[in-house]
Image (cartoon, helix red, strand yellow):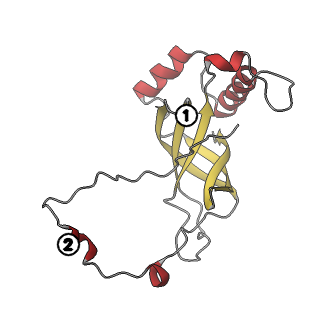
Amino acid sequence: MTDENPKTEEFDFNDTPTEELTEADVLNQDFSLEDEYKEPPLIIKGNYEGNVTKVSVDAKSHAILWQVVLEGNGGMRSDGSTPVDGAMVFYRNWIPKAVDTNEMIKSGIMTKRQWKINALKKFADEMGINMDKPSIIKEAIENGDWIGLRVLCTVDISEYQGQFRNDVARMKQTF
């Protein structure tokens, strides 16, 4: 199951200056796309430890979004100079939608609802957390119960609309 708009990095496009700028002010900058463009450094595929720093509900994609900051791994990203430790990575749990009850997954062996429930169950078991009902999940998120959990993330590299990025393919708590 893939997200149609998998926003994994946050950027505040509403970051406005304290003073009003004119068009001339905005375009009176010194930069060169050809000289300055750099691909974002990627984390090499593998298993990395980190800590859960935020858990939220992403209503737009109908998912629970886990934010993890990698820590205690050492090593550098693909550019050879950006550390892996301190990187923020994300994992999504897909939550069943009403329409998933009647829609089958591509293989046709189960409904999307059943696939999502099975995936949530396996995830909860590997994390050692209770996600039995939406009310339990909601309360745990509101109370910050899962913040600070030490986890092992299987980091992968994927491509979306020509851009490469890191994804967390699997996550489990390290006890």
Q: Nearer the viewer, mark 2 or mark 1?
A: 2
Give coordinates of residue 112: x percent, y percent. 73, 24
User: Taking 30 as reference, is 116 above or below it?
Assistant: above
Circle 2: element type: helix
Of all residues shown, which one is farthest toward the front?
A: 23
Q: Could you tell me the amino acid type at mark 1? A: Ser
Point out the image quarter for the C terminus.
top right
Q: Please tell me which residue lies in front, 20 or 69.
A: 20
- Mark carried by residue 61: 1
Inspect this view and state whether residue 147 appears.
Answer: no
Alpha carbon of mark 2 to alpha carbon of mark 1: how far? 38 Å
**Of the residues shown, which amino acid type is indicated by label 2?**
Asp
Residue 148, labelled with which disc? none
- The percent coordinates of residue 174 (x first, y second) are 64, 42
Q: Residues within 10 Å of mark 2 (few under 14, many from 20)?
A: few
Callout 1: few (<14), some (14-19), or many (20+) C-alpha neighbours within 10 Å? Answer: some
In this rendering, the answer to whether 32 lies above or below 155 is below
Judging depth in this view, the residue of 140 and 157 nearest the camera is 157
175 lies left or right of 24: right
Q: Residue at x 27, y 74 (%)?
A: 27
Query: Residue at (55%, 17%) from the top-left corner?
Result: 134
Res 126 quadrant in image: top right
**Residue 166 appears at what percent x and percent y?**
61, 56
Please indicate, yes or no, whether residue 37 appears anywhere in the rendered image. yes
Write down the residue under mark 2. Answer: 25
x and y percent of residue 50 in the render? 56, 50
